[in-house]
Amino acid sequence: MAKVLVSDPIDQVGIDILSQVAQVDVKTKLPPEELIKIIPEYDALMLRSETKVTKEVVEAGTNLKIIGRAGVGVDNIDVPAATRQGIVVVNSPEGNTIAAAEHALAMMLSLSRHIPDANLSIKENKWDRKRFIGTEVYKKTLGVVGLGKIGSHVASVGKALGMKLLAYDPFISKERADQLGCTLVDLDLLFSEADYITLHIPKTQETAHLINREALAKMKPTVRIINCARGGVIDEDALAEFLAAGKIGGAALDVFEQEPLGESKLRELTNIILTPHLGASTAEAQVNVAIDVAEQIRDVLLGLPARSAVNIPGLTPDVMEKLRPYLQLAETLGNLVAQLAGGRIEQLTIRLQGDLASNETQPIVVAAIKGLLSQALRERVNYVNAAIEAKERGIRIIETKDASVRGYSGSLHLEAKGSMGEHSVTGALLGNGEIRITDLDEFPINVPPSNYMLFTLHRDMPGIIGKIGSLLGSFNVNIASMQVGRKIVRGDAVMALSLDDPLPEGILSEITKVAGIRDAYTVKL
Ligand SMILES: NC(=O)C1=CN([C@@H]2O[C@H](COP(=O)(O)OP(=O)(O)OC[C@H]3O[C@@H](n4cnc5c(N)ncnc54)[C@H](O)[C@@H]3O)[C@@H](O)[C@H]2O)C=CC1
Ligand SMILES: O=C(O)C(=O)COP(=O)(O)O
C-alpha cells in the first residue's frame, strides 16, 4: 500500500480521502534532518507553509510521486528540484481565496479603527475612547498590487465599501481591471496615490523587496500597508524604520521574511498589526484545500492525472482525456524513433499535421519526448521531467505544425538526429483510436505497433522476404504480420514485421548478412 506523509496540520477530511488509497502518517513540526531521514519511505507528501521542502528533502524522497501543497503558495517547495526528479507538485489554487481576501480586508478595517489596540485597552480595564479615533475607508483610495484571485476579491469588496480602486498587475488586461472597477496604473502612481496598499502577489525574483525604502519614500505619510501575500515582498527593516519615524501611517502583516517570526523590531511598534500567517486559516478554506489536494494525491497514486499540477503546464485531466490517444501515439513514435536512431540523440523534430496542428500541442510534444527518453531513462522519465531531461541532455526539440491533411485527418511525424544517423517515423490514429505507423524513413507503410518488431531497409528484389521469413523460422520466431513499403519498383524498400516473440541474440547480424539487406533494426515497444 502506498504511504503518504502529512507534515503540516490539515483538515481530517483530507486524511479520510488519502486513507482510501494509502497508509497516512501525520507527523507535524518535523526537524529538517528527521524529514530527510523518513521521506524515502513515502510515495506522497502533503503539507502547508510550515514544512520546507528543500532540494535535500526532494532528493532524499526517492519514492515520491507527488507533493501536495494544501494552499496556494509553493515557495516553500523546491519545485525545480521536484520537476527534475519527476515529482508532480500540486496546489489548491482557489480553496483559500476568500479566506485570504477576507483576512486582508479585516486587516484594513482593523488598521482604520484600531481594533486590536482598543480590544487590548478595554481588557486592561480602561475606557479610552479618545485614543482610538479612526478613519473611514469610504472614498479612500485602495491600491491593489496583484489583481489575481485574492486581489480581485479584495477589490470587489473595496468597491462595495465605496473605495476608489487603483491596481498594479502587469499580467492583467485592462478589460479585467475595468470589470472590477479598478484603474490599472504603474507602481509609482499607485504608491503615491493610495491611502491603503494591499499586496496580493507571489514572492518571485521580481517581487522580492518590492516594498523597500525607495518605494516607501514615494508613499503618503498616512498610507497603510497590508501584506497577506508573502513575507519578503516587503523589506521588513525598511518598513520598521518608516513606521518608527512616522513616515507612513501603519501596516498590517500576516506573513514574514522568516516564519515563525523570531526576534523582530516589528513587535515593538505600535502602528502595526501582526498575525501569525492566518490568511488561509478558516474552517471553510481548510476543508476546501484539504479536499482539493488530497483528491489530487489520491488520483496520482492511482495513476490518474492531477488537476492543478504546477509543474505540468497544460496537462489537466480534461486535456488528458481529450488527448489520451494522441499522447499514446506520440509516446510510441518517440520510443520507436529513439530505437531506430540508436546512440545519443541530438535533435528531435516533431511535426504535428492536420487536426493535430490545431490541438493543444504542448502535451503531445512532451509525450513524444517522454517516449524518446524512455529508452535511456525507463520509468524515471514522466510528463513532469521529460522536457527538462531533454534539455539537460542537450537534445534540441523543434516543433512544427502543418495544418494540411495527408491521408489521415491528423498525423504526427518525428525525426531524430543522433550520433548514429537520422531516422523518421510518422503515425496516425484510426477512427477507433488504434495507432498505425504510416511511414518509416519516408517509406510508406501501414502497420500497428506491437511489442516486438523488426524493420529492415533492403533492395526490393525477389526472394528477400522469403529468406527473412525462413531465418526467423529457424530461430523459432513467429511472425504476426509483415508489410513492405517502397517508393519505386526494384528500388529501396522497408519491411516492417510484427513478431510474437522477442528476437534472440545474434539474429540481427544473420539478417544483415542476407543479400540485399542494407540495415536491420529490432524494436521493443
Ligand atoms: N496569507 C495567507 O495565508 C495566504 C497567502 N496567499 C498568497 O497570496 C498571493 C496571491 O494569491 P492568489 O491571488 O491566489 O494568486 P494569483 O496567482 O491568482 O494572483 C497573483 C497575481 O499576482 C500577479 N503578479 C505576478 N507578478 C507580479 C508582479 N511582479 N507585480 C504585480 N503583480 C504580479 C499575477 O499576474 C497575478 O494576477 C500568493 O503569494 C499566495 O501565496 C494565498 C493564500 C493564503
Ligand atoms: O496558501 C497559501 O499560499 C498560504 O500562504 C496559506 O498558508 P497555510 O496553508 O495556512 O500555511
Image: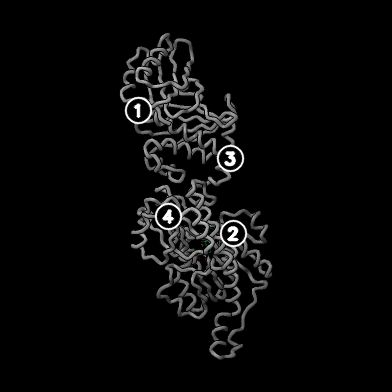
Residue at mark 3 to residue at mark 1: CA–CA distance:
36 Å
* Residue shown at the point (66%, 69%) measured from the top left: 163
Q: Quick one: label 2, few (<14), some, or many (20+) residues within 10 Å?
A: some
* Discs 3/1, front: 3
Compared with 296, 341 (above or below) is above
Q: Earlier in the sequence, mark 2 or mark 4?
A: 4
Gap in angstroms between the C-alphas marked 1 and 2 = 51 Å
In x, y percent, where is residue 87?
A: 43, 50
Query: Which mark is on residue 3?
Result: 4
Quickly name the residue at label 1: 420
Q: Earlier in the sequence, mark 1 or mark 2?
A: 2
Judge: label 2 CB < 8 Å from ligand 1.
yes
Q: Do the numbered discs 4 and 3 sit on residues whose CB atoms are within 8 Å?
A: no
User: From what the image shows, is residue 193 above or below residue 318?
Assistant: below
Amino acid type of the residue that numbered disc 3 sits on in the rendered structure: Lys
Left-right relation of 140 to 296? right
Whole-percent x and y of residue 185? 60, 60
Question: 472 or 413, which lies in front?
Answer: 472
Estimate how packed mark 1 is, as few (under 14), some (14 to 19) or many (20 or more) residues with alpha carbons within 10 Å.
Answer: few
Query: Which is nearer the N-term, disc 2 or disc 3?
Result: 2
In this orientation, does residue 403 appear?
no
Under circle 1, the secondary element is loop
Q: Nearer the viewer, mark 4 or mark 3?
A: 4
Q: Are marks 4 and 1 in contact (CB under 8 Å)?
A: no
Identify the residue under disc 3: 322
- Quarter-of-image position of residue 132: bottom right
Q: Residue at the location (43% across, 45% down)? A: 385
Considering depth in this image, is 521 or 310 the residue closer to the camera? 521
